[in-house]
Each structure stands twice: as structure tokens, then as C-alpha cells.
């Protein structure tokens, strides 16, 4: 069903949201209107969609009205398009009916979620339907977790080419990054905390690196995890926890499982932040670790969580200014080692605020890749990761159009 002719190639759902507007701007500049790609804007509010179209000078773009809780409207929307790309989160609150509609209608789908408890639910409930309909459902198509997922894929490709064997261990360390938080990101984090309060059993999902692997494959070897200031003698720097590691590591292990675990049953992967060398690096690692731990502790307690929401954290619809978005960047390093001890280092970089300007490019190219590159991507329906669904086709797009680089350093 997924590849039959439809009215649209692509529908942007949530075009009036903070990230939705960034995505719309990216697509307007990237593909314009009236060209090869037929696309539309969608959301629940007609006035807001018209305002977005006017802002970017694309009043001729069709609009579709569909509330996130209206399954019949979402089914009708999904049936009109090859691909739905959505920015409407928190996905655990507003995304489930859309995933169900796309799975049922054989419509490819991609999003920005970093909510593993919701991803596990969607995989378990809709995998069989998506496989039968031909719908390719691809979560995590932003900063979480394209750079990590595709960075590992790139390094494994390099290892196979040079050593004829995969890396059995890869460590990702953020060398440098600059970016801000939006209200949507904060809302997703707060919702996870609320879900854990209502169901403490969800802590196991959040803590397990195998939580979003296919059913029957959610166990494995113990994984390394940087939880505090740590000196890495191989890299020669101090490390601190990386806030996105909890979701990125799960996505990498899901990719490994979907591929049939070709990197070995004992494959290990972890993520952290570099804080520098010597005493200064140690001090910064302690400060980052303490700050992150303190914030998570406050966010985990109901009264202080509500206080943070009211007085400190950005509200939904808020986020970094255009100047801040343009000034952002990320520089990630991947350190791989084969079973024989051979080592190699890779680098993935991106231009623009990681979670916003850069993410708009990543999400936009993922959606276009699903819509245009079917002959270069996985054709079977089901729930995939960015690397297992689109692999080299998406990497090529990201380098050519979205400002990402994938490099071998040594």
C-alpha cells in the first residue's frame, strides 16, 4: 500500500509548532512549491496554518485540518499522502493516534521523539499492522538520534572496509556543542516524569539500553554508562554524563538488533561529554554531573517539578532565537575498537542549534528520503531506525543539504 500513487508526497503535521515552523521554513527553502514534491501543511488550527503559510510566502500550499485525538481525521489525512512528518509532542500525549493511522493506512512516518516509554508502546502495538500495510515508521529523526545512530553506522562501515570486522565497542563523546532548549523539549521531559510517577515500573524502560529493541531481544550484556565525572585514559580527557545518552543508546541497540546483531552479542556502546584535561577538566566534569543530577532530582519531585515549569523552564512554543539557532553547532567523536583490538575514530558535525536549526534539516531530509528514495532505502513495512530504514541514502542527503559531516579521523 505504501508506494501507491497518492495526492501528496509529504504532509507536515504540526506545521504551526515551534519546530514545525522551522521544518516548514527548511522545506520551503529546500524544495519550494509547485515542483516535483507535492506537499501540504497540517495541524488542528486553520488560522495558525494560514499564518505559517503567509509567513513563508507559500499561501498556495494546501492545508489539512486534523486534531491529534481525532482518529478518523488522521486516517483521512494519512490516506492522502506517502509520508507524514510530525513535530507534535510530547508524543506520548499527542502522537499515538497518528502512528496508528499511518500504520493502518500504509503511510510512511517520521518524527522527533525522544520518549522511549512511548516508542516501546507503539512498537509493541503497531508493528504487525505496519509490516502488513507496508508503512515504514521511523522515530528519532532529529538530534536524538540521527547523529548517534548514523555515526555508529558510518564507523562500522569504515571498520568493515579496513579491518574486515566490526567494532565490538564504540564510545561516543561530545567534543563541543552549542544550543538551547525549547518548551516542547521540556514538556516531553516533564511528561516522562509524570508517567513514571503514575507507573514506577517505567523506570526499568528508561534505564534499560535494550528497551526499544524488538520483543524477545530486550536483554543483553551489561552496558557501560557514564553517570558522573570519569577520566578516560584512552582519550586522555575527563567525561561527564550526556543528557541525550538515555535515548541515543537505546536507538543504537535497536539498530543493531534489527540488523541481526552483526556487531556481536557482546557489542557495547555508550555516550558522554568531554570536559577537558587535567584539573580544569575534572572540575568541569564534576560541575556538569552535579548540575544534571540536581536538575533531574528536582524534576522528579512533584512540587519542585511544577515550580520549575512555572518559573524557570521555557513554555511550549518557546525556544532559542533565530540568532541563537544560527550560532549553534555540534561536534561528536566516535571511538571504535574491534575484537582484535584495532582502533579507529570518526567524527560527526552539524551546523546550527542541534535541537532546532540542525534538527529541522535532519527531519526534513529524513522525510524527503522516505518520499523520494524508495529504491535506495528499506522497502518493508515496520518500525525502523534512521540508519536501518535509510542508511547511506539519508547520509548523502544530510551531507549535501543539511550541513552534517561524517569523517574518519584515524
Image: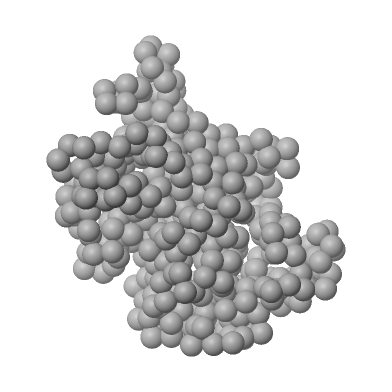
Residue 161 seen from this side: yes
Task: Using the image as rendered, state which of residue 23 and residue 91 is in the foreground.
Answer: 23
Q: Residue furthest front?
A: 162
Quadrant of residue 379 in the image? bottom left
Closer to us: 164 or 350: 164
* Residue shown at 54% from the left, 50% from the top: 399
- Scheme by which the image is coloured: one colour
Point out residue 332 in the picture as x, y percentages from the top left corner.
45, 38
**In this view, 296 is above or below 317:** above
Question: Which quarter of the rendered picture does the C terminus lie within?
Answer: top left
Residue at 39% from the left image edge and 78% from the top image edge? 380
- Apparent side of residue 182 relative to residue 157 in the rendered image (left or right): right
Q: In this view, does 60 lie to the left or right of 12?
A: right
In this view, the residue in front, 240 or 287, is 240
Identified at 73% across, 42% down, the residue is 322
Give the x, y percent position of residue 145.
45, 52
Which residue is drawn at the image coordinates 30% and 55% (left, top)? 253
Q: Is residue 179 visible?
A: no
Q: Which residue lies furthest to the top in this view?
A: 279
Please tell me whether residue 335 is drawn above or below residue 389 in the rendered image. Answer: above
Return the x and y of residue 190 as percentages of the image width and height.
51, 50
Q: How many marks?
A: 0
255 vs 189, left or right, is left
* Residue closest to the eye, 178 or 218: 178
| Residue 105, placed above or below residue 405 | below
Residue 56 picture location, percent across and down: 81, 59
Residue 72 is drawn in which quadrant?
Answer: bottom right
Amino acid at each position: 500500500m505504501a508506494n501507491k500513487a497518492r495526492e501528496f508526497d509529504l504532509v507536515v503535521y504540526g506545521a504551526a509548532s515551534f519546530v514545525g515552523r522551522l521544518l516548514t521554513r527548511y522545506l520551503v527553502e529546500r524544495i519550494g512549491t509547485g515542483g516535483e514534491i507535492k506537499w501540504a501543511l497540517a495541524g488542528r488550527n486553520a488560522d495558525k496554518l494560514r499564518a505559517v503559510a503567509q509567513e513563508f510566502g507559500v499561501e498556495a500550499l494546501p492545508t489539512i485540518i486534523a486534531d491529534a485525538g481525532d482518529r478518523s481525521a488522521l486516517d483521512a489525512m494519512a490516506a492522502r499522502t506517502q509520508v507524514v512528518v510530525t513535530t507534535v509532542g510530547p508524543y506520548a500525549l499527542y502522537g499515538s493516534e497518528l502512528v496508528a493511522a499511518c500504520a493502518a493506512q500504509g503511510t510512511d512516518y517520521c518524527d522527533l521523539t525522544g520518549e522511549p516509554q512511548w516508542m516501546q508502546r507503539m512498537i509493541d502495538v503497531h508493528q504487525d499492522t505496519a509490516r502488513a500495510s507496508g508503512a515504514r515508521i521511523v522515530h528519532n529523526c532529529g538530534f536524538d538520534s540521527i547523529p548517534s545512530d548514523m555515526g555508529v553506522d558510518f564507523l562500522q562501515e569504515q571498520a568493515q572496509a579496513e579491518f574486515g570486522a566490526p567494532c565490538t565497542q564504540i564510545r561516543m563523546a561530545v567534543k563541543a556543542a552549542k544550543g538551547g532548549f525549547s518548551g516542547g523539549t521540556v514538556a516531553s521531559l516533564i511528561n516522562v516524569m509524570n508517567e513514571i510517577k503514575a507507573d514506577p515500573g517505567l523506570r526499568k524502560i528508561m534505564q534499560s539500553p535494550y528497551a526499544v529493541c524488538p520483543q524477545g531481544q530486550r536483554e543483553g550484556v551489561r552496558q557501560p554508562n557514564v553517570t558522573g565525572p570519569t577520566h578516560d585514559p584512552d582519550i586522555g580527557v575527563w567525561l561527564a554524563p550526556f543528557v541525550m545518552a538515555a535515548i541515543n543508546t537505546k536507538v543504537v541497540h535497536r539498530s543493531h538488533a534489527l540488523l541481526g546483531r552483526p556487531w556481536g552479542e557482546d557489542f557495547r556502546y555508550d555516550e558522554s561529554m568531554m570536559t577537558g584535561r587535567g584539573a580544569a577538566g575534572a572540575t568541569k566534569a564534576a560541575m556538569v554531573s552535579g548540575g544534571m543530577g540536581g536538575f533531574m532530582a528536582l524534576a522528579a519531585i512533584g512540587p519542585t517539578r511544577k515550580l520549575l515549569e512555572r518559573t524557570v523552564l521555557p513554555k511550549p512554543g518557546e525556544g532559542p532565537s533565530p540568532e541563537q539557532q544560527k550560532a549553534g553547532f555540534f561536534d561528536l567523536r566516535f571511538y571504535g575498537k574491534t575484537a582484535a583490538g584495532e582502533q579507529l575514530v570518526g567524527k560527526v558535525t552539524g551546523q546550527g542549534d542541534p535541537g532546532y536549526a540542525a534538527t529541522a534539516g535532519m527531519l526534513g531530509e529524513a522525510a524527503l528520503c522516505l518520499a523520494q528514495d524508495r529504491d535506495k532505502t528499506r522497502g518493508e513495512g515496520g518500525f525502523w531506525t534512521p540508519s536501518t530504514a535509510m542508511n547511506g541514502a539519508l547520509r548523502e542527503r544530510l551531507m549535501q543539504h543539511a550541513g552534517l559531516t561524517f569523517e574518519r579521523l584515524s
